[in-house]
Amino acid sequence: MPDDKPAGPRAAIAEELGPPDHYRLAAHDPGPPSPTQVRIAIRAAGISFVDVLTAAGGYQVKPPTPFVPGSECAGVVEAVGAEVAGIAVGDKVVASGWGGLFANVANLPARTVRAMPEALSFEEAAVFPVSYATAWHALVDRAKLQTGETLLVLGAGGATGYAAVQIGRHLGTRVIASASSEAKRALATAGGADAAIDARGADWRAAVKAANGDRGVNVVFDPIGGEATDPAFRSLAWNGRHLVIGFPAGIAALRTNLPLLKGASLIGVDVRQFGIFEPAKSETNRDTIFALAAEGKLRPAITRTYPLEDFRAAMEDAAAGRSAGRIVLTMD
């Protein structure tokens, strides 16, 4: 369908879930915020593999239609609801939502809106909250990663993988990054990885073991799934923890004797449900990562930006997974 070219607010929208060419740029003004909402003039919106998967209807939870993709953004507050406190018009903020953010303007619940760390640009801030909150929850809450342990990060050049590299480094662990291209391995090294190995190498397990002094690793951060999961689990040391973050490469089948032989744990990580069932702890985590971002200790890597008009190309770029760093949409 052709795109509209209105002068006012616009959004990428589709009546039915599907690939990027199902979506069109159309006039879209959400109106004034409700009493508990904040209206944000979006300056930048992040695009992740999950955003594209959700837009296509391939995610485990399907959103209602018509649908505007996008789950994280940064911008400037235009209006606040009557019951909102602590947020004012003109504030620079970051926010997350279940869709609705590939747009110039969005109304979001005030509880999902936070002051933007001054150390970050709009583009960096737009892709900060979700990936870093996920990685922090995975490593600190679920794996209970300890100083001096070894962390193996799969997909280390991707969104959550790169966040895990930086957080692992901050927590005082030895970080081994596994990534599929030289550019992604270089990015992981720049982010603090102690060693970087080729995810497609012929003897990957041997390379992991060699990178850790011929020992198994304590924690695996796995946002990949598919064929990567089994050899990664086999690389664990005694009492190791394997974190399941996602599975864009497919859902793996793991033999149940492996956890027994290694005294190891397979641990699921779902930051969305964590926020629902443990909201206070989730907010405390976000306080922590935002404070670290303000100090310049955590910072996303942006590889490419696209104007809103080119949202389809941006979605295809993010879905391909070849880029080292994040893809961001920028607004007028």
Image (cartoon, rainbow, N blue to C red):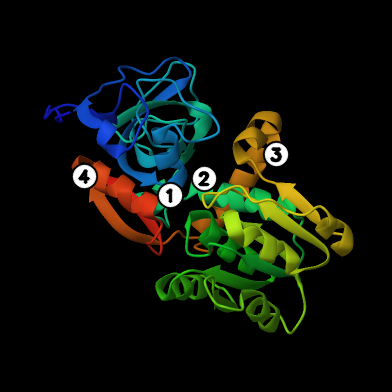
Q: Which residue is mark 3?
A: 281
Q: Is residue 232 above or below residue 209?
A: above
Q: Which residue is mark 4?
A: 310
| Circle 4: residue type | Asp
Q: Are marks 2 and 1 in contact (CB under 8 Å)?
A: yes
Judged by depth in the image, the label closer to the viewer, 1 or 4, is 4
Q: Are marks 2 and 4 in contact (CB under 8 Å)?
A: no
Inter-mark Cα distance, 3 to 2: 15 Å
| Circle 1: residue type | Val
Q: Earlier in the sequence, mark 2 or mark 4?
A: 2
Q: Are marks 3 and 1 in contact (CB under 8 Å)?
A: no
Q: Which residue is mark 1?
A: 127
Residue 104: tell me if it is visible. no
Inter-mark Cα distance, 2 to 4: 23 Å
Q: Few, some or many C-alpha atoms within 10 Å of disc 4 (few <14, some 14-19, many ≥20)? A: some
Q: Specify the quadrant that holds the C terminus.
A: top left
User: Residue at left 39%, top 34%?
Assistant: 55
Left or right, residue 305 beside residue 256: left
Q: Position of residue 139 (x, y in %)?
A: 69, 55
Nearest the eye: 181 or 151: 181
Q: Is residue 258 above or below residue 2?
A: below
Q: Which residue is mark 2?
A: 130
Q: Earlier in the sequence, mark 3 or mark 1?
A: 1
| Circle 3: residue type | Lys
Q: Specify the quadrant that holds the N terminus.
A: top left
Q: Earlier in the sequence, mark 3 or mark 2?
A: 2
- Where disc 3 sits, the SS reads helix
- Disc number for residue 223: none
Inter-mark Cα distance, 3 to 4: 38 Å
- Where disc 4 sits, the SS reads helix
